[in-house]
Image (cartoon, rainbow, N blue to C red):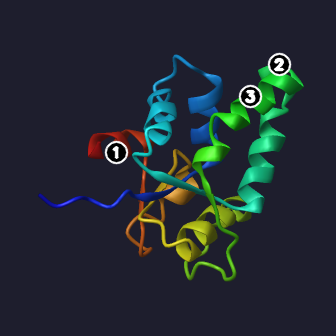
């Protein structure tokens, strides 16, 4: 019996937000996925800062305590890795580049996103770029 290595995965912020904030969403299963150590989510200072910033959006109506609780449902399961170089592939939306850089430098196997600008780059990187639905079919 061969043991498969646990995949190193970069989840974009919208994917993480959907899994954390919307507990009955189609992405809620991701919470158990990373909690069960079925993957190693990679984060960087830039991606954590974006997550914290977006959790504070007024449209979510989350108290400071609830935001900290949600961060606690994700960040302890993550490995922090701060990229030291740019991914050779550039995204047309500069706000998405940190996810590519993180996946590239962190040696991620996958970048999971619903963002069309990132999905347009599928097949052009050393790591797989796919939707959360495609990622779920792997598991």
Upstream in sequence: badge 2 or badge 3:
2
Give coordinates of residue 26: x percent, y percent: 46, 25
| Gap between marks 1 and 2 measured at Cα | 30 Å
Report x, y in % for residue 49. 80, 52
Q: Are marks 1 and 2 in contact (CB under 8 Å)?
A: no
Mark with earlier residue (1, 3): 3
Q: Is residue 138 above or below residue 44?
A: above
Name the residue furthest front: 1
Q: Name the residue under label 2.
A: 61
Of residues 102 and 133, which is closer to you in this image? 102
Q: How crowded is mark 3: few (under 14 residues within 10 Å), some or many (20 or more)?
A: few
Outermost residue, left side: 1
Q: Which residue is drawn at 48% across and 56% down?
A: 9
Disc count in the image?
3
How far separated are the C-alphas under marks 2 and 3?
Answer: 14 Å
Closer to the camera: disc 1 or disc 3? 3
Quadrant that contains the N terminus: bottom left
In the rendered structure, the answer to whether residue 33 lies left or right of residue 82 reads left
Secondary structure at badge 2 equals loop
Bin the neighbour count of mark 1 within 10 Å (Cα to Cα): few under 14, some 14-19, many 20 and up: few
Residue at 41%, 75% (x, y): give it. Answer: 126
Q: Which residue lies under the disc numbered 3?
A: 69
Residue 9 circle label:
none
Q: Quadrant of residue 18?
A: top right
Q: Name the residue under label 1.
A: 134
Cα gap from disc 1 to disc 3, whole angstroms? 28 Å
Comes first in the chain, label 1 or label 2: 2
In the displayed structure, 95 sits above or below 133; it is below
Q: Residue visible at 37% across and 69% down?
A: 123
Residue 128, position in %: x, y?
39, 63
């Amino acid at each position: 019996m061969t043991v498969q290595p646990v995949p190193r995965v970069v989840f974009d912020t919208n994917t993480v937000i959907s899994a954390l904030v919307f507990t009955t969403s189609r992405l809620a299963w991701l919470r158990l996925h990373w909690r069960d150590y079925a993957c190693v989510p990679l984060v960087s200072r830039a991606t954590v800062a974006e997550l914290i910033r977006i959790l504070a959006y007024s449209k979510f109506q989350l108290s400071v305590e609830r935001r900290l609780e949600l961060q606690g449902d994700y960040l302890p399961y993550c490995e922090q890795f701060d990229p030291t170089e740019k991914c050779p592939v550039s995204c047309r939306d500069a706000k998405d580049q940190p996810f590519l850089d993180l996946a590239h430098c962190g040696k991620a196997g996958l970048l999971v996103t619903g963002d069309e600008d990132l999905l347009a780059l599928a097949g052009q990187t050393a790591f797989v770029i796919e939707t959360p639905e495609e990622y779920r079919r792997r598991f």
